Image (cartoon, coloured by chain):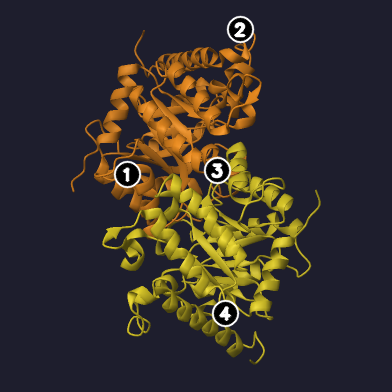
Chain colours: A orange, B yellow
Amino acid sequence: MGSQSAFSDRLMAAIEAKNSRLCVGLDPRMADLPESVTRSDGLSVPSVEAVIRFCVAILKATAPYAVAVKLQSAFFEVLRAGGDMAYSALAEAASRLGLITIADVKRSDIGSTAEAYAQAYLGTPDAPSPFDAVTVNTYFGIDGVKPFLDAARATGKGVFLLVRTSNPSAVEIQDLRLEDGRRVHEAMADLVKQWGTDLVGRLGYSDVGAVVGATVPQHLELLRGRMPQQPFLVPGYGAQGAGPQDVVGAFDDRGLGAIVNSSRAIIYAFRQEPYSSRYAPEDFAAAAAEAAKDTRDAINQALRDAGKLGPV
Amino acid sequence: MGSQSAFSDRLMAAIEAKNSRLCVGLDPRMADLPESVTRSDGLSVPSVEAVIRFCVAILKATAPYAVAVKLQSAFFEVLRAGGDMAYSALAEAASRLGLITIADVKRSDIGSTAEAYAQAYLGTPDAPSPFDAVTVNTYFGIDGVKPFLDAARATGKGVFLLVRTSNPSAVEIQDLRLEDGRRVHEAMADLVKQWGTDLVGRLGYSDVGAVVGATVPQHLELLRGRMPQQPFLVPGYGAQGAGPQDVVGAFDDRGLGAIVNSSRAIIYAFRQEPYSSRYAPEDFAAAAAEAAKDTRDAINQALRDAGKLGPV
């Protein structure tokens, strides 16, 4: 099977077509959902139904402003079997709305186990999956990654491999200094670059992407230089503290090469200023739409200010 | 909530009571199941039903010889919603057979996401889970681990944290040498030891365990010294190449402190010598029982030879 490189080309084309670099993160934590979806006629709505109602409304409202959506598996797994059905159904709904869909599962295992995970989330040529890409943990090295690369190659899909995460304790292992002078996450970046070389598409990007957090902005710039062919999935924006200027380093000179994920700051915008004073909780979808539009525009403006995007 | 330390004490008591250090790994890959469970009256049995039939028979047959069972999540996730139900139901069945149950999910994420995973696999005091322990990936540092520690503390359950895995490419990241002289997996071991200090039970072991592969035997001895309070879950035995002598270093001088996982060499014993010449494929459960007994006995004999276990 030859290289199809479909994912990276589709992602970059979608970024240009929509002029958006925003990935909306669907983290439907039951305790955070507005009462308008969790209660109906004074009765509790079953959890799975409430999550579907909430997510479908968010997807429809934010799809015009986002290029991708990342569905966080944990919040579906905790709902057990019904959650699994919702996970796939929402990915299908997102695809129909024209969004690139990412299964944020961060799975980590080897051999036939990793093959089963790859099949579960990327599908096979005969049994397609509604997801365009999947996130994978890299602590195992290539043994844990190769089954996903093989599945990506066979299906024209993508993977995002953890390189430097956005959380404070990423320093404990990922930032340790090696005897050769590199930090652990730089050694990981060098591996990821190498793993992705034979899956490079027409636009110069690989179907093997990297997760690089925005909470330490200099990482983005350094790792962009270190992995010029990797599409970046950038967490840490919004609720975790990073802003538009912080993510500029993730992009190439044409404003391509990365998508920036924001989860809570978009989907729970109705709880946060400036949106909470303008929208009632039951108007959560409208608040999310405005937050998505504002985030898309703020990232694009920061890229324009940095000379990485032409004038409006 | 104070420390309950229930898991490590229960695990060590079970090892002593059964005089077994064997953990049977349930990796029910559809393509590997015998025809006697995948076909009935000439028709294909639905995948979920075949997996349940196979696993229940294996559990019943091997329970007398094993102390624990590890259910590999990937092979259930690939079956979608029905797989999720089977995953819980089989853990309940294993518990009723007196086995310690481990959810081998190797999840990796942070914050409210990791909380949702912890709740999904360890349950809560109000909504118990059929699993006694869960495996967790450690690349995120404490942010990815703490929600599991909190859940373990609240429910009296355990976690096994990835330190040094059993696969060949573990060398790519986990064995890199740091500027302070430690290898990455040794730095991880030092973190895991520290994270487990306030969850130590009566027998001196913590509810915070470590995954340490048997494929490089000197790791077990060195890491046992480095993490004296961590119960070890030891993969790599059997199909991955390690034998009884290789795992001796994982145990303390009383023959406690570790369980050794074998998956394919037990559950697919009917395909492998010496069992395949004595058992027909439809007698897969009897073959698994004999393989489990042989493995239990071989590990105990190696411990006796090393002076870590008294005479029979």
Residue B103 in percent (x, y) is at 55, 56
Q: Label 3, on which residue?
A: B109
* Residues marked 4 and 3 touching at CB (< 8 Å): no
Discs 3/1, front: 1
In the image, what residue type sits under mark 1? Gly
Residue at the spot 50% in from the left edge and 54% down from the top edge = B87
Q: Position of residue B128 (x, y in %)?
A: 66, 50
Q: Nearer the viewer, mark 2 or mark 3?
A: 2
Q: Specify the amino acid type for callout 2.
A: Arg
Residue receiving disc 2: A278
Tell me how far mark 4 sits from mark 2, CA to CA. Answer: 65 Å
Q: Answer whether residue A127 is visible to the viewer in this image.
A: yes
The residue mark sitting in front, 4 or 2, is 2
Q: In this figure, which residue is indicated by the disc labeled 1?
A: A123
Q: Chain of mark 2?
A: A
Q: Camera-side residue: A96 or A297? A: A96
Q: Are marks 3 and 1 on the same chain?
A: no
The residue mark sitting in front, 2 or 1, is 1
Circle 1 marks a residue in which chain?
A: A
Look at mark 4 in the image and give the residue it sits on.
B248
Vertical side of A187 occupied by A131: above or below: above
Q: Are marks 2 and 3 on the same chain?
A: no
Q: Secondary structure at mark 2?
A: loop
User: Which residue is rendered at x = 40% and y = 27% of the image?
Assistant: A68
Reading the chain from its start, which is encountered first: label 4 or label 3? 3
